[in-house]
Amino acid sequence: MKLAEALSIRADLQRKVNQLKERILRNAKIQVDEKPAEDPNELLLELDQASKELVVLVKKINKTNNVLKFEQNNTMADILAEREQLASLRDLYRELAKQATVSQDRYKKLEIKFMPAVDVKSIQKQADDFAKQFRELDVRIQALNWTEDLIE
């Protein structure tokens, strides 16, 4: 199985686990003399099985990412950490630009006037640069994911 396939299966299992949790909680209590729409005990068994499958798969993915070389001096795990950092910076700079953008909704001169504490244009440019770096790195990661086999 290719690493990309394993990542897709992991995403499906994560969704399944989250949906099972929601279904269990929705059926946790009922009125006296009523039956739940779904048996929470059966759902708990299904959740337990899906969680175990997810753990096994995540371990294989992590093992693969720790061994898989990305370029010369980095493993896939190293590059994934860098991608996460780029995403974090991108999101921060986007939010900073958004928060610093001042819209004047004043109706009277007595109302408080705000002004940006940062150069919004420069901050937005940095956010765009981080987004571009993230996209370029992500494309390279995805390409490698489709060529490499999952380590069992």
Image (tube, rainbow, N blue to C red):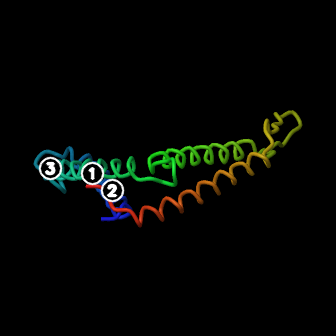
Three-letter amino acid code at disc 2?
Arg
Badge 2 density bin: few <14, some 14–19, many ≥20, Cα 10 Å: some
Q: Which residue is mark 2?
A: 10
Against 104, is 143 above or below?
Answer: below
Q: Which residue is mark 3?
A: 45
Q: Secondary structure at mark 2?
A: helix
Residue 106 pos. (x, y %): 82, 42
Looking at the rendered image, the disc whose residue lies closer to the viewer, 3 or 2, is 2
Q: Are marks 2 and 1 in contact (CB under 8 Å)?
A: yes
Residue 94 pos. (x, y %): 66, 48
Q: Which residue is mark 1?
A: 54
Q: Secondary structure at mark 3?
A: helix
Q: Name the N-terminal-most of marks 1 and 3.
A: 3
Three-letter amino acid code at disc 1?
Leu
Horizontal side of 112 relative to 37 (left or right) equals right
The label shown at residue 93 is: none
Looking at the rendered image, the disc whose residue lies closer to the viewer, 1 or 3, is 1
Residue 138 pos. (x, y %): 53, 58
Q: Of 146 and 74, which appears nearest the observer?
A: 74
Q: Secondary structure at mark 1?
A: helix
Three-letter amino acid code at disc 3?
Leu
